[in-house]
């Protein structure tokens, strides 16, 4: 995409940042939605080709075009695009951007699964109510014994479609988690490393990982705890050093310093208390 065309409309990320948190989603007609999805898929196909040819920056731009066009209520389609963007950022060692894109993908999948669980629950309740009404009608007519069970079908196309969608969601979730976990591990820092551990723990429980991915997960779960602990200790020490410098600046006019105060750890609770020591 040229710089000129980029100026015509804001990126998908800019749109999300500018949008109100409670903004109602615009629902398109089936025809409009189909046209938008087709346009989004065309950009996605081009982005996939760019990724395959190692043109990652250009691929990100085309994926962004696909996100911008795609209706914002199609969480699965958007999750796929953002997971792919995370893969591009990983190739470019853009760890923060990869974390952001993968997290957006996972958030979308969370919303999708909650909505589908709610719909499934409502459908189950409606079906149970319908069966109760049918049973009451049969019994009241005195035909309970004559009633025959409905014939079993070889398969329900709607249920097959729902099952496939659940499998697709699990597949994209695994990809997004793998990408975010790696990006967090590479970016480093206490919070990111702890987050990577959590991601890999979730991945360890997923039955749809490939053998190669599971090997990576197991390796990371062995090595990350030590890195996380070291990062925690380093950041804690840095924080105390900065607090000490700040405290010395405040206490200096009173002829005191932080050396006059001693932090004592309570081994039972893990908390700290402060003891004052006068000048000697």
Image (tube, rainbow, N blue to C red):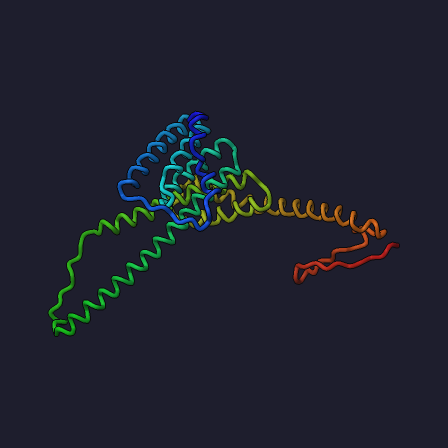
* Residue 110 placement (x, y as % from top left): 41, 50
* Residue 258 placement (x, y as % from top left): 79, 51
In this view, the residue in front, 171 or 39, is 39
In this view, the residue in front, 108 or 225, is 108
* Residue 64 placement (x, y as % from top left): 42, 35
Quadrant including the C terminus: bottom right
Quadrant including the N terminus: top left
Q: Residue 150 is drawn in which quadrant?
A: bottom left
Reply above or below: 126 against 142.
above
At 23% across and 68% down in the image, what residue appears?
A: 132
Image side of residue 224 versus residue 47, left or right: right
In this view, the residue in front, 64 or 89, is 64
Reply above or below: 228 against 94.
below
Q: Residue 136 is drawn in which quadrant?
A: bottom left
Image side of residue 267 versus residue 250, left or right: left
Q: Residue 55 is drawn in which quadrant?
A: top left
At 66% across and 44% down in the image, what residue appears?
A: 234
Q: What count of labels does the image hold?
A: 0
At 30% across and 35% down in the image, what residue appears?
A: 38
Name the residue furthest right. Answer: 280
At 36% across and 46% down in the image, what residue appears?
A: 26
* Residue 186 placement (x, y as % from top left): 54, 38
């Amino acid at each position: 995409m040229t710089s000129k065309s980029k100026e015509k409309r804001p990126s998908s990320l800019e749109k999300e940042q500018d949008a109100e948190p409670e903004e109602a989603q615009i629902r398109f007609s089936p025809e409009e939605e189909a046209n938008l999805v087709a346009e989004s898929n065309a950009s996605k196909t081009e982005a996939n080709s760019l990724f395959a040819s190692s043109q990652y920056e250009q691929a990100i731009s085309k994926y962004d075009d696909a996100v911008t066009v795609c209706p914002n209520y199609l969480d699965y389609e958007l999750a796929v695009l953002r997971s792919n963007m995370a893969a591009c950022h990983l190739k470019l060692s853009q760890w923060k951007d990869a974390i952001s894109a993968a997290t957006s993908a996972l958030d979308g999948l969370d919303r999708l699964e909650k909505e589908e669980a709610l719909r499934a629950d409502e459908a189950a309740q409606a079906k149970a109510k319908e069966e109760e009404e049918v049973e009451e009608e049969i019994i009241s007519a005195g035909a309970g014994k004559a009633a025959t069970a409905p014939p079993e079908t070889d398969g329900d196309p709607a249920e097959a479609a729902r099952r496939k969608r659940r499998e697709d969601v699990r597949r994209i979730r695994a990809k997004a988690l793998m990408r975010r976990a790696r990006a967090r591990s590479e970016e480093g820092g206490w919070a990111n490393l702890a987050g990577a551990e959590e991601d890999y723990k979730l991945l360890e429980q997923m039955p749809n990982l490939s053998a190669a991915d599971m090997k990576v997960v197991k390796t990371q779960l062995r090595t990350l705890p030590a890195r996380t602990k070291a990062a925690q200790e380093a950041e804690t020490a840095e924080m105390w050093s900065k607090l000490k410098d700040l405290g010395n600046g405040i206490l200096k006019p009173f002829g005191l310093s932080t050396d006059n105060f001693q932090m004592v750890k309570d081994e039972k609770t893990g908390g700290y208390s402060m003891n004052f020591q006068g000048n000697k």
